[in-house]
Amino acid sequence: MMGADIAPYADDLALMVEASRMAADIGMSHFRKDPEVWYKNEGRSPVSEADIAIDKLLKQVLLNARPDYGWLSEELEDTEHRLADRRVFIVDPIDGTRAYVGGRPDWCVSVGLVEDGRPVAGVLAAPARGEVWKAHLGGGAFLNNDRLLATDAVSGDRLRVAVPDIVAKEMRRGAETGLNKVAGGPSLALRVAAVAQGELDGVFVRPQASEWDLAAADVMLAETGHVLVDRAGRRMLYNQPDPSRGLLLAASHRQVPDLLGLLQSPASH
């Protein structure tokens, strides 16, 4: 993934941006219009008719243009065939479906591309917020037309960090006193993108997040001096047999050791 390999990612990204724009139009056509909704995962996870329509559109548009790429998405049945593909689209048709069906703007269409397990291009289309986030390996990360700066600057004396309640329970006693805990928001992808933007210093990701929640935003982290790691500090690898993950952290390289240090060791709980 050096030198000459970067140009194809730019071509892929242009395709992904166009496909996500079409998907965003579908999303907005149902937004705040009482779309049909049903529930999966024992009633915990809402799915709307827009999720399904977007998923089908993205698969058709992207794989028609890149028939030799694999596919993994939240709403279509997974198969093991993708494991043999070097490049795989990883898609969440609507990240933040609860916000979407509730008429709140904090949702997005997440389209990521990974190669050999590493994220190389990503788009987050958040039309209700008027935002398009995009990045490809070696090409920088952008919010609309503004390039996101590569920085690990700290936003004041106390780090602004999103900490889900389930993760807070795994922290050492008193560890949170040095943090400015902020609300995470319904879209994990947009939460992680806020780290790349510098709006948040870190995001702890609760266990059971999936590759489709993270692949696109992970590219934006990489292009701005940030990283997504597990509690042992290892970079996340994609296109794995099981797309779900344990506890993760998105933060700058400089902040990762201190933030991971707030957690209890796994043996202590």
Image: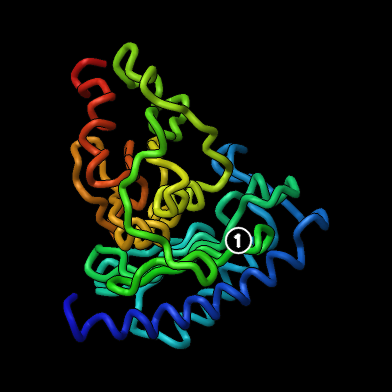
Please, what secondary structure does the residue beneath circle 1 have? strand
Q: Is residue 244 above or below residue 56?
A: above
For the residue pair 45 and 247, the one nearer the viewer reads as 247
How is the structure coloured here? Answer: rainbow
79 lies left or right of 29: left
Residue for point 75% across, 59% down:
31
Q: Where residue 266 appears, x then y in whole percent?
A: 22, 24
Q: Where residue 198 appears, x then y in whole percent?
A: 42, 49
Look at the image and tell me in which quarter the C terminus lies: top left
The residue lying furthest to the right in this view is 33
Q: Is residue 236 visible?
A: yes
Q: Where residue 217 appears, x then y in whole percent?
A: 41, 57
For the residue pair 46 and 16, the one nearer the viewer reads as 16
The residue lying furthest to the front in this view is 156
Residue for point 41% across, 65% down:
90
For the residue pair 59 and 132, the one nearer the viewer reads as 132
Q: Which residue type carries mark 1?
A: Ala
Residue for point 43% across, 67% down:
147
134 lies left or right of 105: left
Q: Is residue 46 above or below residue 11?
A: above
129 lies left or right of 200: right
Q: Which residue is mark 1?
A: 126
Q: Where residue 120 appears, x then y in whole percent?
A: 31, 69
Q: Is residue 81 visible?
A: no
